[in-house]
Amino acid sequence: MSLLSQTWHWSISGFIIGLIMLALIYFGKVFGMSSNLRSLCSMTGVGKRVPFFDWDWKSQLWNLAVVFGAMIGGYVAVQYLSDPTNVALSNETLSQLSGFHIDLPNGKLLPETLFGNQIFHPSLQGDLAKQSFRAIFILIFGGILVGFGSRYAGGCTSGHAISGLSNFQMPSLKAVIGFFIGGLIMVHLIFPLIF
Amino acid sequence: MKTLKFILVGFVFGIVLTKSEAVSWYRIYEMFLFQSFHMYGIIMTAIITGVIGIQLIKRKKINDIAGNPIEIQDKEKGTFRYWIGGLIFGLGWALVGTCPGPIFILMGSGFMSVGLILIGAVFGTFIYGVVKDRLPH
């Protein structure tokens, strides 16, 4: 079991992700996760008012099946294959996190500071209330950027970085360079202002 | 059976992304600090695997599961949308540490707060749908 519960090596992980994309091509589909967000919008019936959501989203139900499977996979991996040695970051990253007063991983996937359920706690006062308000704002606002940006760019990490670059698509290269410029701006210029 | 194979592919995807820690906010942060090769290794190996597979499909003219020739569509031409859309996506990706796949995977893992990211992401997609025709592409 420990072989499965330790952090998987990047080469094995990357290889399997590549195979997943190829499997979907073999099934006559395309690997791209952000289109599911468009499907979710369309499912609310908003297509009657906004033409962009008036499309054949039912032909994309297979992709929601992938999402469903991915959620179960995530559950199984976290519940049964977690290990305290997971998320072993580099020492430089750890000291940078400490500087921002963000809790260190110690086997966790996500920092409590941002993702812990205490952010929903209504009775917090003073500094704690400020922190949970900040976390909630960050998560929703970040989500908006991810949703808006991936649709504007016509794809996300799976659609452009993996599918697109594997097929030598120039538009995907532009998008992926954009992803990285955005990420570098956020981490190097904006994080020091907000954390 | 038709749907089951997609659920199965998703299941493997969810496990790999979790166990490779590509769903981890920490790993995305570390990646953008250039302090570990881990995430770059994952992305590069996935692309190399994809390139080899797609070349094989094209050269050997492999058919899909239904017996139809595989045609991989080219991405639409454009410039502005890819640079600016990509940049906006990147800002969000680094801030919340999740791209769309991991949003779903982490919700399945039981991280309630990631539901806020999903709400934001669906809303962001909605905003794009509304203002789309007024944006340069």
Image (tube, rainbow, N blue to C red):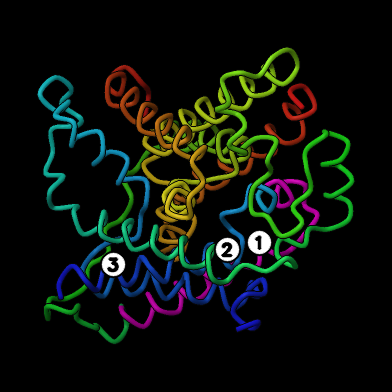
Residue type at mark 2 is Ile
Spatial CA span between label 1 and label 3: 27 Å
Q: Label 3's element? A: helix
Q: Chain of mark 1?
A: B
Residue drawn at the location 74% of the way across and 63% of the way down: B37
Where is mark 1, residue-wise? B40
Q: Nearer the viewer, mark 1 or mark 3?
A: 3
Q: Which residue is mark 2?
A: B43
Q: Residue at x 47, y 67 (%)?
A: A76
Secondary structure of the residue carrying tag 2 is helix
The count of marks equals 3
- Horizontal relation, residue A1 to residue A175: left or right: right
Q: Residue furthest front?
A: A123
Q: Which residues are magenta?
A: B29-57
The residue that mark 3 highlights is: B7
Please provide percent x and percent y for residue B79.
43, 36
Locate residue A154, reporting x and y percent: 36, 41
User: What amino acid is labelled 3 in the image?
Assistant: Ile
- Mark earlier in primary sequence (1, 3): 3
Q: Main secondary structure of the magenta part?
A: helix
